[in-house]
Amino acid sequence: MSLTTVYISIGNSDDRLTQKEWAAFALRTHLAVDAYAREIHGSWYSGPATEYQNACWCAQIPERRIDGLKDRLRELARDFRQDSIAWAVAPDTEFLGAPS
């Protein structure tokens, strides 16, 4: 199975969403990533005292499921009045070993 590692990021820097809407957007994005990913390596959220709200997920997505996840993310962007959701492919992974 061929897998692609991606970073998916959402934000609310324009305060378009209320706190309740932001929480729903973040949860529904997480559920979408979880439904399509083979594995989620991590999820990160902006600190509670920061000026802007952001969230990011790193996940391995099977190639055959990429289009479905992208479509779902586009639906979420529309549902939550967002211009876009960032999709960043991690094309190269380098494993760094400890020095001898």
Image (cartoon, helix red, strand yellow):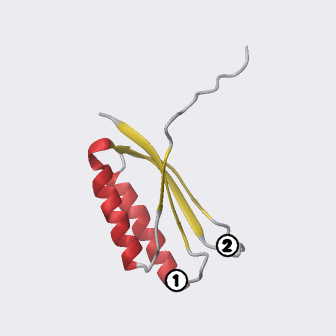
Quarter the N terminus occupies: top left
Q: At which x and y percent is residue 23?
A: 50, 76
Instruction: Please tell me whether mark 1 sits on a helix, a strand or a loop.
Output: loop
Q: Residue at x 58, y 27 (%)?
A: 95
Tell which of 55 and 84 is nearer to you: 84
- Numbered marks: total: 2
Q: Which residue is drawn at 35% across and 58% down?
A: 70
Instruction: Please tell me whether mark 2 sits on a helix, a strand or a loop.
Output: loop
Q: What residue type is labelled 1?
A: Leu
Q: Which mark is residue 91?
A: none
Tell which of 20 and 85 is nearer to you: 85
Q: Residue at x 64, y 26 (%)?
A: 96
Q: What residue type is labelled 2?
A: Pro
Residue 73, placed above or below residue 87 = below
Q: With 1 as the anchor, is 46 left or right in this view?
A: right
Q: At which x and y percent is residue 30?
A: 43, 62
Please give the residue where the numbered disc 1 appears in the rendered image. 17
Q: At which x and y percent is residue 58?
A: 50, 50
Please give the residue where the numbered disc 2 appears in the rendered image. 48
> Badge 2: how crowded within 10 Å, few (<14), some, or many (20+)?
few
Quarter the C terminus occupies: top right
